[in-house]
Image (cartoon, helix red, strand yellow):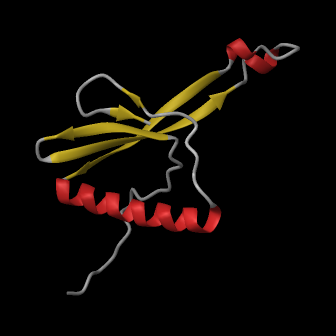
Amino acid sequence: MRFEVERSPCYRTIVVSGVFGGHRPGFFEAIVYTDELMADRALETQPPDSSKVAVKRTIQCRLLMNPFQAKALLMWLKEHVEAYERKFGEIKLPEKPRRAEGPGYMAV
């Protein structure tokens, strides 16, 4: 079988700050977001006021996958994370992922 590959007009690069989502019968859902530190108001004062720092969270996209696609993505990520860690050392997570409301949903 031959594949013809074409980029969508909507194609773009997204810097991922985190993902939340979950699973339901028949599909997995991953919602990707980007966080941006908003420090303009904090820098208006001398010294800067850290209580005025905010985070702007932008929802970038929603990925829907059937269970087979989700498992294939899991295997692909596992393979590449293991290769990365062999080359650069173990990736240490700063904290455990926190559960969001609802069964099967997790925010990272």
Q: Most extreme residue toward the right, as rendered?
A: 46
At horizontal 77% and vertical 13% (from top left) the residue drawn is 49
Q: Position of residue 12 (x, y in %)?
A: 47, 56
Q: Which residue is found at the position 35% from the left and 25% from the top?
A: 100
Nearer-the-camera pick, 68 or 37: 68
Place of residue 30 in the rendered image (x, y in percent of width and height, measured from the top left):
32, 43
**Quadrant location of the N terminus in the rendered image:** bottom left
Asked which quadrant contains residue 25, the reply is top left
| Percent of width and height locating residue 102 | 25, 24
At 64% from the left edge and 63% from the top edge, which residue is drawn?
A: 88
Judge left or right: residue 10 versus residue 65. Answer: right
* Residue drawn at 23 percent across, 46 percent down: 28
Position above or below: 75 against 16? below
Judge from the rendering whether residue 30 lies leftward or rightward of residue 81; answer left or right. left
Give percent across and percent down for residue 106.
Answer: 35, 33
Q: Quadrant of residue 19?
A: top left
Position of residue 83 relative to residue 107, above or below, is: below
The image quarter containing residue 99 is top left
* Total numbered badges shown on the rendered structure: 0
Q: Residue furthest left?
A: 25
Q: Quadrant of the C terminus?
A: top left
Q: Is residue 10 left or right of residue 72?
A: right
The answer to whether residue 67 is left or right of residue 94 is: left
> Camera-side residue: 31 or 79?
79
